[in-house]
Amino acid sequence: MNKRKPELVQAFKVAFPHTIPVLTGYFFLGVAYGVLMQSKGYNFIWAGLMSAIAFGGSMQYVAIALLTTAFNPVQACILSFMVNARHMFYGLSMQSKYKGMGKIKNFLIYVLSDETFAVAYTLEAPPNINRRYFFFAISFLDYMYWVISSIIGGILGNFISFNTKGLDFVLTALFVVLFVEQLTKKANWLSGAIGVIATLVSLTIFGQRNFIIPAMVIIVCMLFCVRHKYEGSVKNTDVIESTCKIETIDKILNERSAD
Amino acid sequence: MFLTPLQTFIMILAIAAGTIVTRFLPFVLFPENKETPKFVMYLGRVLPTAMIGLLVVYCLKGVSVVTAPFGIPELIATVCIVVLHLWKRNVLISISVGTVVYMVLVQGVFC
C-alpha cells in the first residue's frame, strides 16, 4: 500500500498536463450544462447526479429536453444509445490499449468519452510511470472535470456573465490537434481521409441531426473496402512496431503481477 | 422541475443505461481471455484515426459555408492550429492559440 501511493501521485502529475485542454472544454460546457439544468428547475444536485451517472456530454444536453416532457424512460434509453452509438467504436479502438488493466478496466470503460478516447488513444504512459495508474488518472481527471463543472454551473446559475463566446471551440481545437498528430504517421492517412469524407457525405445527405450513425456505417464499409491496402503494408510500417510495443507492455505487466 | 424526483432519477438511470451499453458492448463481445477476431483487430487499428476525423467534422457541423460569416473564423482558426502544431508540436500551445484566435474572430471581427 505504501508503495502504491507515490506511484499513483506520480501518474496524476504526469497525466495532468495532457488533460488541460479537456479541463478547459469540460469546464465551459459543464458549467453551461449546470446553468441550463438550473433554468429548467433542476438544481445543482440533479446536474451533478446526471453528470456523474450518465456522463455523456451531448446526450445530457439532449436529455434536458426529455426532462421537460412526458415521462418516458424507454424512449430516453433508446435515444441515448443512438446518440452515443459512436462510443462502440472507441471500445473497439481501445481493445489492445486497455488489455490487462485489471480491476480499473470497468471504470475506464464506464467513463470512455469522446475526449478521453481521443487523448488516451494518442498517448502512451512514460516508461517510469505505472501504465494502469496513468490511464486511470486521465480518465478520472476528465470525469471529475465534467461532474464538478456541472455542479458549479448549477450553483452559480445565472451569475456568470463574462463573454465566453467561442470558448467551446477548445474541444474542436483538441480534436484537430489529435487528428494532425495521427496524420503524422503515413499509415493513418487513408483512414483519416475516410473518416472526414464519409462524415461530410453523411452530413450532406442526412443533415445535422441524424448523420452520425450513417457516417459510422459508411466508415466501416469503406475501411473494409481498403483492407487489402493495409494488409499489404502490415509488414513494413509501424504496425509491427506498435504490436511489439504492446507485447513488451504485456510482458512488463505480467512480470509485475508475478512479483 | 417538470418530473417528480423519482421520475427524474429513473430518467437518469435510463439515459445512463443507453450510454453504458455503447461503451461496454465491444469489451463484452470480445473479452480479453478469448482471441479477438481478425476483423476486429483490423478495425481497432484503422478506426481511431477515422473516428477522430469524424469528431472534427462533428464539432464543425453547424458551420454554414453559404451564409455569413461563411465558416471563415473556423477555417482561419483551424489553419492556425494545424500550422502551429506542425511547427511547434506542442498540444497546449496549438489548442490555446487556436481557441483565442477563434474567440477574437467571433467576438471582435465577424460579429
Image (cartoon, grey):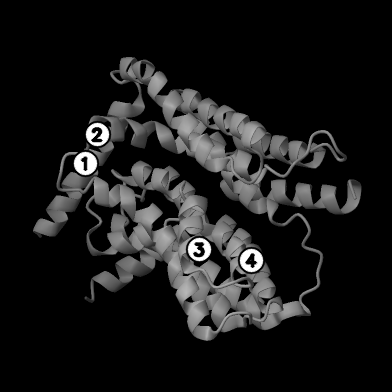
Determine whether A98 is above or below A237 in the image.
below
Can you identify the residue that label 3 sits on? A76
Return the residue nearer the eye: B85 or B78: B78
Please say if the residues under marks 3 and 4 sit with CB atoms less than 8 Å apart.
no
User: Label 1 sits on what residue type?
Assistant: Thr
Identify which residue is drawn at 79% across, 34% down: B65
**Earlier-in-chain disc, 3 versus 1:** 3
Identify which residue is drawn at 59% across, 67% down: A66
The chain identifier of the residue carrying mark 1 reads: A
Can you identify the residue that label 1 sits on? A248
Callout 3 and callout 2 share a chain: yes
User: Label 4 sits on what residue type?
Assistant: Ala
Can you identify the residue that label 4 sits on? A65
Disc nearest the viewer among 2 and 4? 4
Q: Would you say residue A17 is visible in this rendering?
A: yes
**Earlier-in-chain disc, 3 versus 4:** 4
Residue A93 in percent (x, y) is at 37, 42
Residue A10 in percent (x, y) is at 37, 65
